[in-house]
Amino acid sequence: MIQIKTRADFDKMREAGKVVEEALLTLGRAVEPGITTQELDEIAKRVFDKNGAISSSYHYGEPPFPGYICVSPNEVIVHGIPRRDWVLKEGDIVTCDVCCSLEGYHADAARTFAVGRISPEAEKLIRVTEESFWKGFEKCTIDHRIGDVSAAVQAHAESFGYGVIRELTGHGIGRQLHEDPDVPNYGRAGHGPRIVKGMAFCVEPMISSGRRDIALLDDDWTVVTRDGKYAAHYENTIIITENGPEIITLSEDKNV
């Protein structure tokens, strides 16, 4: 069931969104050759602690996720477990997926960062993944449907020959990290739940530079591209207000 939020709920979610954004900005400045994925995790935790926020990822699920954020380099699509022995090197890309709760309300966003100088192909993948988000965001207006968002993301990514990951989706969010509705990155326009005032959800294109097939590693968390090609991820939390969609994990959002 889709949970419709009040203005008071949205005010709480905005505060959580500010913490997520601060963490991502801090992480983006820290990403450089030689840093470990564990060090990135520790940086995010310090931002959470400073703001009195709680990681939504830490000990989530079964088996309990061991990191405070997901740190996913190169062919890792999502749910990369932070590791002291994974040292990022020049030419890598790395996704930081950050979610936290503050006073019982969650926010969630992800960015893929370049590690030093990266190839033109990797730069293009990161750019197109973000563009796919904005194509979906254009459809996040009252009386559109979730399928309109999904179809817009899919059409843009696939126009570049990229693989759109289907097993992993965006999601509703609020008092729980994952709520209804699912927000796939593929679908049919005109289908799915209608977007109405009071909804809150995450749109998060996960795009592979190769095929869309995935594999789950033995840790039961890390999801990788089956062909070993790079993947990128771009996500924001969106609330639907009487004035239209608002991104709460990005200060200068591109309101429709």
Image (tube, grey):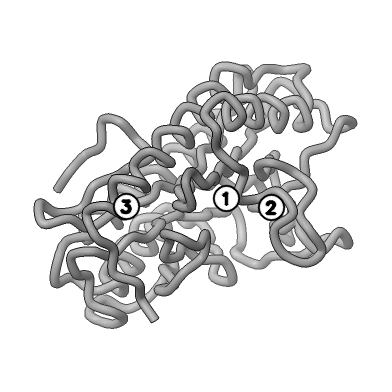
User: Residue at (23%, 64%) from the top-left corner?
Assistant: 198
Q: Position of residue 138 (x, y in %)?
A: 21, 54
Q: Disc 3 marks which residue?
A: 238
Image quadrant where residue 65 sits = bottom right
Q: Amino acid at mark 2?
A: His
Q: Amino acid at mark 1?
A: Ser
User: Residue at (21%, 61%) from the top-left corner?
Assistant: 139
Residue 151 left/right relative to 33: left
Q: Disc 2 marks which residue?
A: 79
Of labels 1 and 2, earlier in sequence is: 2
Residue 63 left/right relative to 140: right
Q: Amino acid at mark 3?
A: Ile
As helix, strand or loop, the secondary structure at mark 2 comes to: loop
| Mark 1 to mark 2 CA distance (whole Å) | 18 Å
The correct choice, above or below, for 205 with respect to 84 in the image is below
Q: For residue 12, say whether it is visible.
A: yes
As helix, strand or loop, the secondary structure at mark 1 comes to: loop
Q: Position of residue 251 (x, y in %)?
A: 30, 31
The mark total stands at 3
Q: Nearer the viewer, residue 51 or 127?
A: 51
| Mark 2 to mark 3 CA distance (whole Å) | 21 Å
Q: Neighbour class for label 1 at 10 Å: few (<14), some, many (≥20)?
A: many
Mark 2 or 3, closer to the camera: 3
The correct choice, above or below, for 62 with respect to 37 in the image is below
Q: Nearer the viewer, residue 75 or 169?
A: 169
Q: Neighbour class for label 3 at 10 Å: few (<14), some, many (≥20)?
A: many
Q: Disc 1 marks which residue?
A: 209
Q: Position of residue 239 (x, y in %)?
A: 28, 54
| Mark 1 to mark 3 CA distance (whole Å) | 26 Å
Mark 1 or 2, closer to the camera: 2
Of labels 1 and 3, earlier in sequence is: 1
